[in-house]
Image: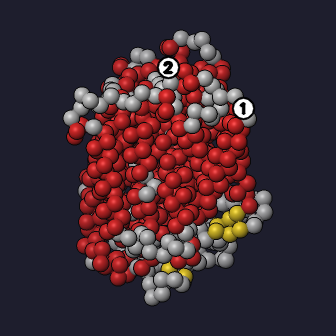
Amino acid sequence: MTLSIIDWLIMLVYFVFVLGIGFALKRYMRTSNDFFLAGRSIPAWVCGLAFISANLGAQEVIGMGASGAKYGINTSHFYWIGAIPAMVFVGIFMMPFYYGSKARSVPEYLRMRFDEKTRALNAFSFAMMTVLSSGISMYAMALLIQTLGLFRGIIPDQYIFHVSVFLSAIIVLAYIFLGGLTSAIYNEVLQFFLIVAGFAPLVWIGLRNVGGWQGIKHTLPAAMTHSWRGMAHASTNTLGVEWIGLSMGLGFVLSFGYWCTDFLVIQRAMAADSEVSARRVPLIAAIPKMFFPFLVILPGLIAVSITSKVVTPEQKVLSSGNPVTGVRSSSPSAAAVVSSKNPTVLDDSHPHGIVPEKTNPLTGQPVLDSNGQPVYNYDLAIPVLLLHYFPTGILGLGLTALLASFMSGMAGNVTAFNTVWTYDIYQAYINKKATDAHYLWMGRMATVGGILLSIAAAYAATSFNNIMDALQLVFSFVNAPLFATFLLGMFWKRTTGHAAFTGLLSGTAAALIHHGLTIPADTAPGIHGGWITIVHRYPSDMAQNFWTAIFAFSVNLIITVAVSLVTRPREDHELVGLVYSLTPRPVESHLNWYQKPSTLAYGVLAMLIILNLVFA
């Protein structure tokens, strides 16, 4: 497509600001603490916006939009039961442990609570997860650039994807290398406001053109417009999972496992200027987070609600130049949804609106499912919607918002990777007695290494048609078993180091075995599962992910309890500040009632209940 000079200027100004922040902060990066933890001097509201923005990467914007198009309003469960309760829990109960213990990372807390081998296992698994997540964001950004044909006429079509991957890597590398976590945090705040400014007009214009929420409800099957209807059975909702799998797999294991143990977001709260501020950070972030479904899920629903195929000139160029982004007419798919006529029976009437069919971005060949039917590329729902509605100028703002989300996701994961690598792997096991200047240098080198590994992960992500499916798979292997370890370690003083290590290994092994024995419907054995043998087929990738997480968590919990009962626990005095029952409660007597984190938590939960009732 051809962008106007206004569109290019908006994107250029954004990149100048991004790199400028890195250069401006470079002179303040004097110690490793400055580089990795921002000197623990950032105000709570800034950390709160960075807390949500670090999670507001490709998985949030593209992934949630894709899930909205694929699964409907059921995707809101990732927020209203899959994020907000866990964010409240981490703010009220877990931040005092993280911040008060002075641990520099989540793996370091595990060393303090358990032992070195538990820390090492988590450090290596978390490092792998961060580069996979960063790679998925990188893949989404490259796919967007290829979709829009920004370099068409300058670079041959077959090389656009590859050039885009490396270009995004270089930009993120530059500002993290220069300014460390502080640079990432302030860029994440900038990116937060850009994303809101870019997507709010898209939702407003889209709703006007499809007849508002009532128009969407009239166009789409009922199962796609009600968040709780049909959850009694896996065959009566679009996610393909019953309420037990949803509430346990997503609402408990995956959500608490991510928000309570993932150093990517915890690192932002730990950069706050006090313990009270650190506790407020997740609660402040929860307020905009609960309203983000209206900003990122609704565009996906709008994209599949568009019934008239009015193709803009830009889309015609796009379609003729690259089969990945051709705007196709709506047609049935093998993906089934619940019939709006009979909500207890599945049919194949999933609408696709302007969502294009998927082709391999490396080869340009169409992608078909195991039945020979076309696979729809839901990851392109929001980019195609931008092209469908936005005029010159506003299009540049919308594209900048997308680019900002990808940069945010990549940068968040890379800053978490370089901290864990330097403190929990390099300093712990390779070079224990180096100077602080040397660790600062190693942090910058780890940034380079993390970016290179992310590039490899970006190419692995090309086999999924919804990056949320890929991300939840990664989380089910790493965060789900880890949450059982944290839950027992923080709230049961009898938990031992040997038990934590054995449980983590067992939980991860359980996730591997479950994934190897199961597979989503209409997929071939391989990265989607079934690589051992197929004993069960799930209705969707997401259903498989939820149950993988449940198996990983349950096995870890059982094994950890069993081993703890036959091994010797640590003395109580060694666990003060690390176990809830042995740790003094945070002092809040000097705070007014409205300043207390608990008051903010009650307000967040009240708003959450209202939202669930409205869209039930």
What residue would you read off at disc 2? 440
Which of marks 2 and 1 precedes in the sequence? 2
* Residue 566 versus residue 283 in the image, above or below: above
Please give the name of the residue rendered at 53% of the width and 77% of the height, measured from the top-left corner.
236
Quadrant hosting residue 19: top left
Q: Is residue 267 left or right of residue 375?
A: left
Foreground: 225 or 274? Answer: 274
Q: Secondary structure at mark 1?
A: loop
Please give the name of the residue rendered at 43% of the width and 80% of the height, measured from the top-left corner.
221
> 10 Å neighbourhood of mark 2: few (<14), some, or many (≥20)?
many
Of the two numbered discs 1 and 2 in the rendering, the one whose residue sits closer to the viewer: 1
Res. 56 visible in picture: yes
Q: Which image quadrant: the N terminus? A: bottom left
Q: Which image quadrant: the C terminus? A: bottom left
Q: Amino acid at mark 1?
A: Thr
Please give the name of the residue rendered at 61% of the width and 71% of the height, measured from the top-left corner.
539
Quadrant hosting residue 291: bottom left
Res. 176 visible in picture: no
**Residues at marks 1 and 2 touching, judged by CB atoms closer than 8 Å:** no
Q: Is residue 357 left or right of residue 408?
A: right
Q: Secondary structure at mark 2?
A: helix
Residue 400 image offset from top left, x and y in percent: 34, 50
Foreground: 500 or 422? Answer: 500
Foreground: 484 or 204? Answer: 484
Residue 389 image offset from top left, x and y in percent: 30, 67
Q: CA distance from mark 1 to mark 2?
A: 39 Å
What residue would you read off at disc 1? 567
Q: Amino acid at mark 2?
A: Leu
